[in-house]
Image: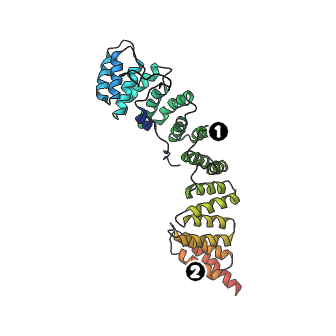
């Protein structure tokens, strides 16, 4: 499976959008904070740390780093907030290698570190491509906020990045069972993982439930995934309507060719021929010779050898399909000779 899963918003985007968000935001009933108070961290007894937070809020990341480097170098006891802010400032400058040590140090110093601190570490590790190291951090985030879908999907993606598809799927299935998956992309990715792990029946059911709930967009790709999953599960009767829906939703004739292929597998020759004519009429076929070959096969099965010969001859012009087309042409000649 491709990694463009890549369909879920990374923590980098979360941090960029919420860099000024409070760790513990005030409720609607609480009074507004006094002017000048930091919202990146709770106020600390250390004026330099509070000043650095204000510099970050003002996007003066270099100034914040200078303050924090000096503060940390002269502080007898490490201050977790200072390390978190230092990591955040480097992160905002795109200096991920420099951001990682202080971000990690902050989390180590604060066993009850808030989610935003853990998000920073996970995001830096992801930017550095160290997905394996990000997994325990993401697991902590899931434990901290089990109702946050982003944490589950990011954890699943991290498992996938290290080729642990079993845990990647298990994570998504837990999120699905908890009704946390609410987007089209969530359902498609879960379905893809189920197919990858050899559970096509569940993959088809997940997508059909998403389509019924109008979460999954009823487009060609979705219906093709459903039909393919049913086919892989051996449920060809259920695959037919799904691929018919895919063909109706398609802009090109390729979906009709896939439907024809299914009909041929089921030995429904007339239905295959009708689907192929529809696909050829829709046009823009990716592999026209393949459609010609299928048409020849279906006509051959019906005993219409003269018509089949015409389509198979055209298919034989393609190097990719020449061998099979020639085999059928040879079989036609043998059948015709036998009749004589």
Q: Percent from the top left, x then y, of residue 198?
A: 63, 48
SS at badge 1: helix
In three-dimensional space, the C-alpha distance between marks 1 and 2, rounded to whole angstroms, equals 54 Å
Residue at the (62%, 40%) spot, across then down: 176
Q: Is residue 281 above or below residue 172?
A: below
Q: Which mark is residue 177?
A: 1
What residue occupies the far bottom of the structure in this picture? 340
Q: Is residue 323 above or below residue 47?
A: below
Image check: 20 left or right of 334?
left
What residue occupies the far top of the structure in this picture? 76
| Mark with earlier residue (1, 2) | 1
Mark 1 vs mark 2, foreground winner is: 1
- Of 242 and 218, the residue lying toward us: 218
- Of 162 and 270, the residue lying toward us: 270
Q: Which mark is residue 74?
A: none
Residue at the (66%, 47%) spot, across then down: 202
SS at badge 2: helix
| Quadrant that contains the C terminus | bottom right
Quarter of image, res 313: bottom right
Query: Do the residues under discs 1 and 2 have CB atoms within 8 angstroms?
Result: no
Q: Percent from the top left, x then y, of residue 232?
A: 65, 55
Quick one: label 1, few (<14), some, or many (20+) residues within 10 Å? Answer: few
Residue 298 in view here = yes
Q: Percent from the top left, x then y, of residue 252?
A: 52, 66
Q: Percent from the top left, x then y, of residue 114?
A: 48, 24
- Of 261 and 223, the residue lying toward us: 223
Which residue, given by chain and number where applicable, does mark 2 sit on? 310
Quick one: label 2, few (<14), some, or many (20+) residues within 10 Å? Answer: some
Q: Is residue 54 above or below residue 291?
A: above
Image check: 74 left or right of 8?
left
């Amino acid at each position: 499976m491709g990694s463009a899963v890549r369909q879920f918003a990374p923590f980098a985007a979360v941090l960029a959008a919420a860099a000024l968000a409070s760790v513990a935001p005030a409720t609607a009933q609480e009074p507004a904070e006094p002017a000048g108070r930091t919202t990146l961290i709770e106020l600390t007894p250390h004026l330099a740390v509070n000043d650095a937070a204000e510099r970050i809020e003002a996007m003066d990341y270099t100034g914040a780093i200078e303050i924090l480097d000096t503060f940390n170098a002269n502080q007898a006891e490490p201050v977790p907030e200072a390390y978190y802010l230092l990591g955040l400032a480097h992160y905002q400058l795109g200096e991920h290698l420099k951001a990682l040590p202080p971000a990690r140090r902050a989390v180590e110093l604060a066993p009850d570190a808030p989610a935003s601190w853990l998000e920073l570490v996970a995001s830096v590790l992801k930017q550095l491509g160290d997905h394996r190291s990000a997994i325990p951090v993401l697991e902590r985030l899931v434990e901290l906020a089990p109702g946050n879908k982003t944490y589950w999907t990011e954890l699943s993606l991290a498992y996938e990045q290290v080729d642990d598809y079993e845990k990647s799927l298990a994570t998504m299935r837990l999120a699905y069972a908890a009704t946390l998956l609410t987007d089209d992309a969530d359902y498609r990715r879960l379905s893809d993982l189920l197919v990858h792990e050899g559970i096509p029946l569940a993959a088809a059911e997940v997508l059909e439930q998403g389509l019924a709930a109008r979460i999954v967009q009823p487009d060609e790709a979705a219906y093709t995934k459903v039909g393919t999953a049913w086919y892989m599960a051996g449920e060809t009767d259920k695959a037919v309507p799904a691929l018919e829906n895919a063909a109706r939703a398609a802009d090109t004739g390729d979906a009709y060719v896939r439907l024809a292929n299914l009909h041929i597998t089921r030995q429904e020759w007339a239905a295959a021929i009708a689907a192929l004519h529809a696909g050829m009429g829709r046009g823009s076929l990716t592999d026209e010779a393949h459609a010609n070959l299928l048409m020849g096969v279906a006509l051959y099965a019906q005993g219409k050898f003269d018509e089949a010969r015409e389509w198979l001859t055209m298919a034989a012009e393609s190097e990719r399909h020449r061998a099979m087309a020639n085999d059928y042409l040879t079989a036609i000649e043998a059948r015709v000779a036998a009749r004589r």
